[in-house]
Image (cartoon, rainbow, N blue to C red):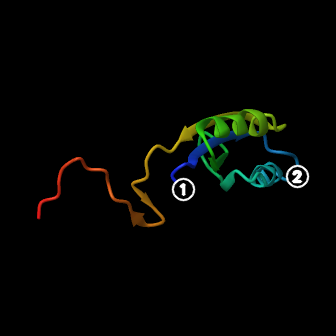
Amino acid sequence: MKTNEVHAVIELKITPQRDCGFGKLAERVSKFEQVEACFLMSGAYDLLVFVKGESLQDVAQFVAQDLSTIDGVLSTATHFMLKTYKAGNVLGKLDDARLEVS
């Protein structure tokens, strides 16, 4: 992950469509270049979407102008990733202000 990239997870509530359920909307959402992954979920929302952008404003603009305006999207909830502790089964080095003892 580049240090200047912003990553977010977006919960989408959508209306299933006749004869195709959630599939067409999921495909449409997945085609955006900002979308890294899209999953159908059980529970309180329907799709879980992982996105990246150049800034918080870039991701917010994508949600406001692109995702939330799609017919069938009922609501969105955006969660920005602030710090990575583990990704791809690899633990990251935790920021620790203490000096190492040798």
Q: Which residue is mark 1?
A: 2
Apparent side of residue 6 relative to residue 101 in the rendered image (left or right): right
The mark total stands at 2
Front-lying residue, 51 or 27 = 51
The percent position of residue 39, horizontal first and vertical second, equals 65, 54
The percent position of residue 14, horizontal first and vertical second, equals 74, 40
Q: Which residue is mark 2?
A: 19
Do residues under tags 1 and 2 come within 8 Å of each other at their CB atoms?
no
The percent position of residue 54, horizontal first and vertical second, equals 63, 45
Q: Badge 2: few (under 14), some or many (20 or more) residues near its Cα, within 10 Å?
A: few
Front-lying residue, 79 or 34 = 34
Q: Which element is circle 1 on?
A: loop
Front-lying residue, 8 or 101 = 101
Of the image marks 1 and 2, the number of the one nearer the N terminus: 1
Q: Which element is circle 2 on?
A: loop
Q: Badge 1: few (under 14), some or many (20 or more) residues near its Cα, within 10 Å?
A: few
For the point 63% across and 34% down, which residue is it?
A: 57
